[in-house]
Image: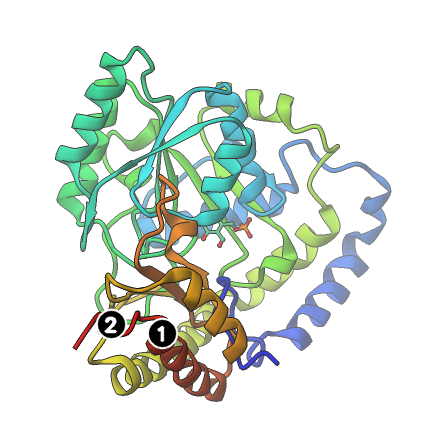
């Protein structure tokens, strides 16, 4: 029996706005439903591209051209298209040392080597990035792009400070390496202080390839995300996107919903996420305060838990299964697929009660997976 599913980044099902979506679908389909006899615009439903540009401008204070956007099946499809457009099998690309498991496995499926760059509690270390770029250049296989999640990083929750964002932008521009900024969590902030500007919004950031999604402020079931980039790259991505278009039906409903409810729904989601983060942190403190440490994210959906070095991850996986606790082990996020002593807890989806009970069960599993006599 599943006690708690900490596995993937999904929002809270109880506050999911079903009635508002039904209303949005009725309104938009009544007005435009017969347009569904047509194939979609190859760049995606124009009103949703305008909304994506507005979402960016409202948060970042910088306008983007809706025609610089390409909609996709989630942001996963744009990431897949970028892998094909910017690199070839056998090439190296750079990611944070720990990065989004879906992106890492996708890059690897395209035959790319994911080369991790050391991070600290604030995110990517620029000295380590420069060294890695130098090393790859010296090996005759320069990095084809840098993939980074600077805001509420998945899995660590880190927020790259402004000076490092500026330094990163300066570095990739000097070295002529494309930067893919994945910013899908930026609206999920639940402390007063806002994260710094997106790298795309910084002066000189015009060439940054910007990827984001509606999955995290609505739900991944909508399967709508996007990329914004220069005309030439968008054309290349469109030439690779052989699916005859991203669903206009989904895009119509999401557009209408977002036009009416985006601000209030996002605010509610952030309130729920903050409450759940606090419940999880309190439960961890109670159950595992003597054994583990964890990040304290001010936004996003994840806690990154450091396990005792001695942990036997195979035993932990077995014990967690018996305890009915689902999570992603650190290895899934490691750029080098190492068996690192971490795990990620996604706290958006489980109920408050599941978070409390799940932590208890997880604590039992962790204690069972420490070899006898290993820690005091
Ligand atoms: C950093 C990051 N990028 C992209 C995605 C993919 O989301 P989707 O394809 O649903 O937009 C996720 C999902 O967890 C993510 O964490």
Does residue 66 show up?
no
Asked where in the image residue 200 lies, by quadrant, the reply is: top left
Identify the residue at horizontal 46%, vertical 21% (top origin). Answer: 87
The residue labelled by disc 1 is 366
Up the image or down, 334 lies above or below 306; here it is above
Identify the residue at horizontal 70%, vertical 53% (top origin). Answer: 250
Measured as percent of width and height from the top left, residue 120 is found at 17, 50
The residue labelled by disc 2 is 292
Residue at mark 1 to residue at mark 2: CA–CA distance: 9 Å
* Secondary structure of the residue carrying numbered label 1: helix
Up the image or down, 142 lies above or below 242; here it is above
Callout 1 touching callout 2 (CB < 8 Å): yes
Question: How is colour applied across the structure in the image?
Answer: rainbow
Measured as percent of width and height from the top left, residue 219 is found at 58, 62
Crowding at mark 2 (Cα within 10 Å: few <14, some 14-19, many 20+): some
Asked where in the image residue 38 lies, by quadrant, the reply is: top right
């Amino acid at each position: 029996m599943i006690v708690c599913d900490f596995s993937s980044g999904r929002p809270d099902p109880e506050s999911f706005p079903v009635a508002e979506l039904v209303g949005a679908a009725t309104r938009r389909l009544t007005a435009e439903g017969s347009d569904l006899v047509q194939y979609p615009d190859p760049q995606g439903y124009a009103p949703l591209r305008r909304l994506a540009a507005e979402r960016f401008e409202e948060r970042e204070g910088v306008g983007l051209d809706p025609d610089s956007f390409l909609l996709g099946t989630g942001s996963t499809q744009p990431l897949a298209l970028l892998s094909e457009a910017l690199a070839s099998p056998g090439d190296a690309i750079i990611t944070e040392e720990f990065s989004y498991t879906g992106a890492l496995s996708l890059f690897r499926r395209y035959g790319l080597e994911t080369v991790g760059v050391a991070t600290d509690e604030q995110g990517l270390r620029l000295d380590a990035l420069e060294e890695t770029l130098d090393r790859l250049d010296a090996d005759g296989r320069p990095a084809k792009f840098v993939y980074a999640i600077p805001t509420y990083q998945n899995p660590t929750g880190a927020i790259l400070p402004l000076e490092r964002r500026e330094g990163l932008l300066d570095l990739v521009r000097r070295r002529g390496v494309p930067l893919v900024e994945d910013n899908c969590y930026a609206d999920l902030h639940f402390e007063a202080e806002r994260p710094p500007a997106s790298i795309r919004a910084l002066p000189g950031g015009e060439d940054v390839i910007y990827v984001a999604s509606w999955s995290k402020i609505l739900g991944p079931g909508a399967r709508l995300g996007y990329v914004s980039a220069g005309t030439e790259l968008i054309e290349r991505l469109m030439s690779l996107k052989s699916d005859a278009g991203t669903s206009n039906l989904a895009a119509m409903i999401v557009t209408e919903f977002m036009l009416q409810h985006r601000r209030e729904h996002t605010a509610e989601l952030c309130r729920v996420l903050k409450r759940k983060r606090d419940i999880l942190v309190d439960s961890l403190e109670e159950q595992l305060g003597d054994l583990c440490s964890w990040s304290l994210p001010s936004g996003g959906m994840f806690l990154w838990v450091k396990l005792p070095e001695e942990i036997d991850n195979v035993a932990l996986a077995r014990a967690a299964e018996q305890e009915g606790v689902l999570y992603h082990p650190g290895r899934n996020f490691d750029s080098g697929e190492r068996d690192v002593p971490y795990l990620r807890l996604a706290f958006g989806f489980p109920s408050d009660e599941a978070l409390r009970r799940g932590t208890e069960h997880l604590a039992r599993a962790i204690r069972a997976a420490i070899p006898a006599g290993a820690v005091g």
